[in-house]
Amino acid sequence: NHNPGSGGWPTIRYFNKETGLKGGSYIKKTSNAMCEELGDEETMMGYIEEYGNTSTSSCSVIDLNGCTEKEVGYIANTKEKSQEEQQIQLNRLENMMAKEENKSS
């Protein structure tokens, strides 16, 4: 039971690998109403990144803008490889993603 409406409306819950189907409850960060707090785009993106344990910023392979050190290293390493080697790596990564998606289905 997810207790919809408990603590006010709207009920905000998040689901990730740690919480599983049980999910977790959003904990307010401000004194604003929930709709105002998460209505702010920056706050909502922060919530997604924090509770999803992810990042919504993207890494540009063209100018490396927004890339982590690890991503920069990976890009540099990949650029040195032949097109055939890059295609093999892409296929491997796509297969890994497909397996992960099948696990969560």
Image: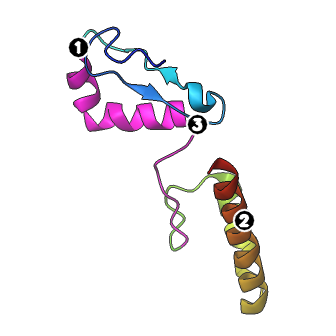
Q: Within 10 angstroms of label 3, few (less than 14), some, or many (20 or more) residues?
A: few
Q: Number of callouts in the render?
A: 3
What amino acid does circle 2 point to?
Answer: Tyr
Q: In this figure, which colouring scheme has been used for the structure?
A: rainbow
Residue at 48 percent across and 57 percent down: it is 58
Q: Which residues are magenta?
A: 32-61
| Residue position marked by numbered label 1 in the rendering | 32
Looking at marks 3 and 1 on the same chain, the residue that comes earlier in the sequence is marked by 1
Position in image of residue 67 (x %, y %): 57, 56
Give yes or no for contact between labels 2 and 1 (Cβ–Cβ under 8 Å): no
**Going by the image, does 15 lie left or right of 5?**
right
- Seen from the viewer's position, the closer of residues 69 and 21 is 21
What amino acid does circle 1 point to?
Answer: Asn
79 w.r.t. 93: above or below: below
Between tags 3 and 2, which lies in front?
3
| Residue position marked by numbered label 3 in the rendering | 53
83 w.r.t. 67: above or below: below
**Going by the image, does 21 lie left or right of 86?**
left
